[in-house]
């Protein structure tokens, strides 16, 4: 006859996974780039973004001054922001509340 030993973890040793903080990538309106260029740049920068989505973001920035491009973890947010800047667009990152 064998005896199985069952270990019980105390609550002090358990790990709690917190979701990674998320960041908002914002596009700012500018008076330099054409609307078509902004739409094309958004589609090239954010994988899977459709033309209607890019047009909506561009129009939001044009009308209200800023628009949300994507909400994601810090590293991809920095990548998207830098890529947009490298294409001559004004972009910033802020923590997602």
Image: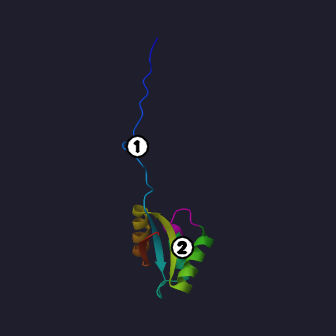
The disc label shown at residue 40, or none: 2
Q: Nearer the viewer, residue 87 or 10?
A: 10
Q: Where in the figure is residue 10, as x and y percent of width and height?
A: 39, 39
Which residue is at a point 49% across and 66% down the rendered structure image?
A: 71
- Residue 3 visible from this viewpoint: yes
Q: Where in the figure is residue 15, as x and y percent of width and height?
A: 40, 46
Q: To which quarter of the image does residue 91 belong?
A: bottom left
Q: Residue furthest left?
A: 13
Cα–Cα span, label 2 and label 1 = 51 Å
Which residue is at a point 45% across and 21% down the rendered structure image?
A: 4
The disc label shown at residue 43, or none: none
Position of residue 47 relative to residue 15, above or below, is below
Q: Is residue 61 magenta?
A: no
Which residue is at a point 53% across and 81% down the rendered structure image?
A: 61
Element at badge 1? loop
Query: With 86 as the anchor, is 45 left or right in this view?
Result: right
Residue for badge 1: 11
Q: To which quarter of the image does residue 12 belong?
A: top left
Q: Which residues are magenta?
A: 43-49
Chain-order first, disc 2 or disc 1: 1
Position of residue 72 relative to residue 42, above or below, is above
Q: To which quarter of the image does residue 93 belong?
A: bottom left
Query: With 39 as the anchor, is 20 left or right in this view?
Result: left
């Amino acid at each position: 006859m064998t005896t199985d030993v069952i270990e019980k973890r105390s609550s002090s040793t358990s790990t709690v996974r917190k979701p990674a903080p998320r960041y908002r990538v914002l596009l700012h309106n500018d008076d330099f780039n054409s609307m078509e260029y902004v739409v094309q740049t958004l589609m090239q920068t954010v994988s899977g973004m459709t033309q209607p989505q890019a047009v909506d973001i561009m129009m939001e920035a044009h009308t209200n001054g800023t628009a949300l491009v994507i909400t994601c973890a810090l590293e991809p947010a920095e990548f998207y922001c830098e890529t947009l800047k490298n294409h001559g667009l004004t972009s910033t990152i802020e923590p997602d509340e």
